[in-house]
Amino acid sequence: MNLRYRKTIIAGNWKMNLNAEAAKQFIAQLKPLAAEAKWCDVVLCVPFLQIPAAVKAAKGTKIAIGAQNCHFETKGAYTGEISCAMLAEAGVKYVIIGHSERRRDCGETDRLVNQKVLAALQAGLRPIICVGETLEMRDNGVTLDLVRMQVKVALRGVMQDQLRRVTIAYEPIWAIGTGYTATAEQAGEVGGCIREVLRQNYGARAARSVSILYGGSMNTSNAATLLAQPDVDGGLIGGASLNAESFGKIIEAANQE
Ligand code: 13P
């Protein structure tokens, strides 16, 4: 973390979990914990259907609501899709783009991720762009090459003044939902590599302003160590974001001056 230059962000990705009632209860429980979080932003990325209830429950609190996906067109014949304008209208502030589960299950490519990022920015949303390697790629030593490429393609056409609304999440696929976490050094190395790509493309000042998150089995016991890395500015948390108490503890770990 480096509070001089950028925000710390703790974001929960609920994936396909929790119904509207559970969302309401969760937010009521999280509210006092989030209120303490002066030094970090708190985001909950909830299933589409839970957005209205979550936005209502989070009104007037420090909690921002995010979505987990979007379409790149503003409207039209795209059955089953939701546009960024619709999300913004519903009170959504953040949107996760290119999560590895969507790359795997829905065939999302870097090019599609790029289209969605541009659409999200256009609609005034803050994209959280997910990148990360498989275990095989890591074993073959191509992690940094892959992540560099994913970041470069995702940001094609993004202007310098839009970059401060972008968040990048490094999520090694082998660490998602597996209980295996990247070491702080591994997370810090990839975070540093992402920052370097941003510096080369946008200059040092713009690069410094971007929050880079780590995601992959982050929990109450490893959060503080991961967040101590200069290029780990927060977390994108799956499993441990489903329980308000444990999510609150991670916020507490991040809320350091
Ligand atoms: P877990 O925290 O459950 O490993 O999930 C991480 C993730 O995919 C967040 O987007």
Image (spheres, rainbow, N blue to C red):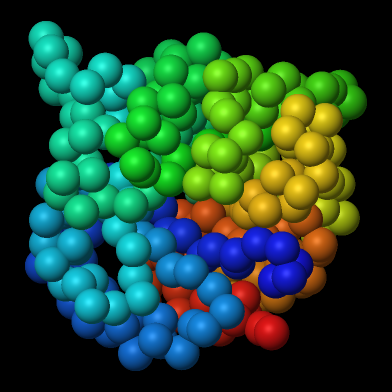
> Does residue 52 appear to the left or right of 155 in the view shown?
left
The residue furthest top is 77
Residue lying at 44% horizontally and 25% vertically, measured from the top left = 118
Residue lying at 18% horizontally and 62% vertically, measured from the top left = 55
> Does residue 49 appear to the left or right of 95 in the view shown?
left
Q: Quadrant of residue 190?
A: top right
Query: Across the whole image, how many numbered discs are drawn on residues?
Result: 0
The residue furthest front is 161
Residue 98 horizontal/vertical position (percent): 48, 29
Q: Quadrant of residue 256?
A: bottom right
Q: Quadrant of residue 124?
A: top left
Residue 86's place in the image compared with 27, above or below, is above
Residue 24's place in the image compared with 99, above or below, is below
The answer to whether residue 147 is seen in the rendering is: yes
Residue 208 horizontal/vertical position (percent): 75, 52
Q: Nearer the viewer, residue 220 or 108?
A: 108
The quadrant of the picture occupied by the C terminus is bottom right
Q: Nearer the viewer, residue 9 or 207?
A: 207
Residue 32's place in the image compared with 54, above or below, is below
Residue lying at 27% horizontally and 33% vertically, measured from the top left = 84
Q: Nearer the viewer, residue 209 or 83?
A: 209
The answer to whether residue 69 is seen in the rendering is: no
Residue 23 horizontal/vertical position (percent): 20, 66
The quadrant of the picture occupied by the N terminus is bottom right
Q: Nearer the viewer, residue 16 or 189?
A: 189
Residue 135 horizontal/vertical position (percent): 73, 31
